[in-house]
Image (cartoon, rainbow, N blue to C red):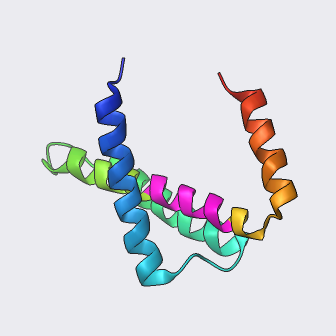
Amino acid sequence: MVSQLKIVAVTHEVAMELDRAVQTHGMGHSPHESYAVLLEEVDELWAEVKTNPRKNPMRNEHMREEAIQVAAMAVKFVLMLDEALTPVNISGVTQGMRHHQV
């Protein structure tokens, strides 16, 4: 089981990366743009996954950095969508989330 402290620490890293990205690039202008940014980060993670660990001893660190960026861009995508939702739609989404919780 993953400790709550570790989850909080990783979530903090994602939030810091998200803040950095928003400060640098803004929130994004459309789902297409946000998807493209997310896909770019996933592709960069995939490139690290495919590297040979013997040739790249920093592979795990690089994969971790890319995974943090993927998570941050996924959160950024959600936040961009939330900005487009009306309060009524957001409450419906929140109710749907409670329905789908595990």
- Residue furthest to the top: 1
Q: Which residue lies at the image location 47% right of the left edge and 75% below the top edge?
A: 22
Task: Report the quarter where the N terminus lies.
Answer: top left
Where is residue 76 shown, x and y percent of the image? 56, 63
* Residue placed most toward the observer, 8 or 70: 8
* Residue placed most toward the observer, 78 or 45: 78
Residue 99 inside the magenta-drawn segment: no
Residue 2 vertical placement versus 37 (above, below): above
**Image quadrant where residue 66 sits:** bottom left
* Residue placed most toward the observer, 69 or 45: 69
Task: Report the quarter where the C terminus lies.
Answer: top right
Q: Report the side of 38 relative to 5 (left or right).
A: right
Q: Which residue lies at the image location 73% right of the left edge and 37% below the top edge?
A: 97
Residue 79 inside the magenta-drawn segment: yes
Where is residue 95 shown, x and y percent of the image? 79, 38
Q: Is residue 50 visible?
A: no
Q: Is residue 7 visible?
A: yes
Q: Which residue lies at the image location 42% right of the left edge and 51% below the top edge?
A: 46
> What residue span does the magenta drawing correspond to?
70-80
Q: Which residue lies at the image location 81% right of the left edge and 60% below the top edge?
A: 87
**Image quadrant where residue 36 sits:** bottom right
Residue 12 vertical placement versus 3 (above, below): below
Number of dots carrying numbers: 0
* Residue placed most toward the observer, 40 or 23: 23
Residue 48 vertical placement versus 41 (above, below): above
Where is residue 86 shown, x and y percent of the image? 83, 64
Magenta region, main secondary structure: helix
Q: Report the side of 42 relative to 86 (left or right).
A: left
Where is residue 21 shown, x and y percent of the image? 43, 73
